[in-house]
Image (spheres, rainbow, N blue to C red):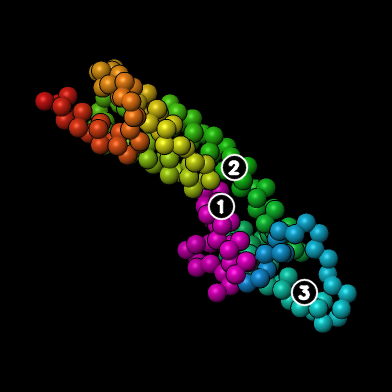
């Protein structure tokens, strides 16, 4: 396989991080990663080796071209090396990914449970933001997720929050979620 399936082709900033992982693996699988990673890749002097070098360089560029949607083909087709193509796409989308990651992280840090939310809906929102950040290459520690979730609970949850803080072994995010579901049932009764 030389390229990605049509549905996995690069669309834009939202899927750039995942696309980059895929494309680098495909290039590596085809022994073409050097055309993207090596700083100064000099063509060989030997005529036969030069012919193979040019063929592999073209193959690497074709893999990249075939892995992007049509609107991006025009953007990168002007470059004469696979490295330039990847660098150009990084310049376009990694900056956007950084801005998007910062915005998502802010949303997560300021997450509050709304009055109309169930605890399950609240945790689903946190998980959704965590997953979006993860696709952009940003990991949030389990400890931070616990603190974010507790911080966003409404005032009537204060005794529960204090009880969590008083535990010798604080729960992980998954355990906190199940503890909160139990607490919500208790509060509703």
Judging depth in this view, the residue of 45 and 62 nearest the camera is 45
Q: Earlier in the sequence, mark 1 or mark 3?
A: 1
The residue located at (86%, 80%) in the rendering is 47
Q: Which mark is residue 96?
A: 2
In the picture shown, does residue 64 fall above or below 54? above
User: Does residue 53 lie above or below 183 as drawn?
Assistant: below
Task: Give the distance between the C-alpha atoms of the residues marked 2 and 3, in whole angstroms.
Answer: 34 Å
Q: At x 34% / y 29%, what residue is drawn?
A: 170
Q: Choose the circle earlier in sequence order: 2 or 3.
A: 3
Magenta stretch encompasses residue 23: yes
In the rendered image, residue 50, in percent from the top left (x then y), is placed at: 82, 76
Q: Residue at x 63, y 42 (%)?
A: 95
The residue indicated by pointer 1 is 16
Separation of disc 1 and disc 3 at Cα?
28 Å
Mark toward the viewer: 2 or 3: 3
Q: Which residues are magenta?
A: 1-29
Query: Contact, CB < 8 Å: mark 2 with mark 3?
Result: no
């Amino acid at each position: 396989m030389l390229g990605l399936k049509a549905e996995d082709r690069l669309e834009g900033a939202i899927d750039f991080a995942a696309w980059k992982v895929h494309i680098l693996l495909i290039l590596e699988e085809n022994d073409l990663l050097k055309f993207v990673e090596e700083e100064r890749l000099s063509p060989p002097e030997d005529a036969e080796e030069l012919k193979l070098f040019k063929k592999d360089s073209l193959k690497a560029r074709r893999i990249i071209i075939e892995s992007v949607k049509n609107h991006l083909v025009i953007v990168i087709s002007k470059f004469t090396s696979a490295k330039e193509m990847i660098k150009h796409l990084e310049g376009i989308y990694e900056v956007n990914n950084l801005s998007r990651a910062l915005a998502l992280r802010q949303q997560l840090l300021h997450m509050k449970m709304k009055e109309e939310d169930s605890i399950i809906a609240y945790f689903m929102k946190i998980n959704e933001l965590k997953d979006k950040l993860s696709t952009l290459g940003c990991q949030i520690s389990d400890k931070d997720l616990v603190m974010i979730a507790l911080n966003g609970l409404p005032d009537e949850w204060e005794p529960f929050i204090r009880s969590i803080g008083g535990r010798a072994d604080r729960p992980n995010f998954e355990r906190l979620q199940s503890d909160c579901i139990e607490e919500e049932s208790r509060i509703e009764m």
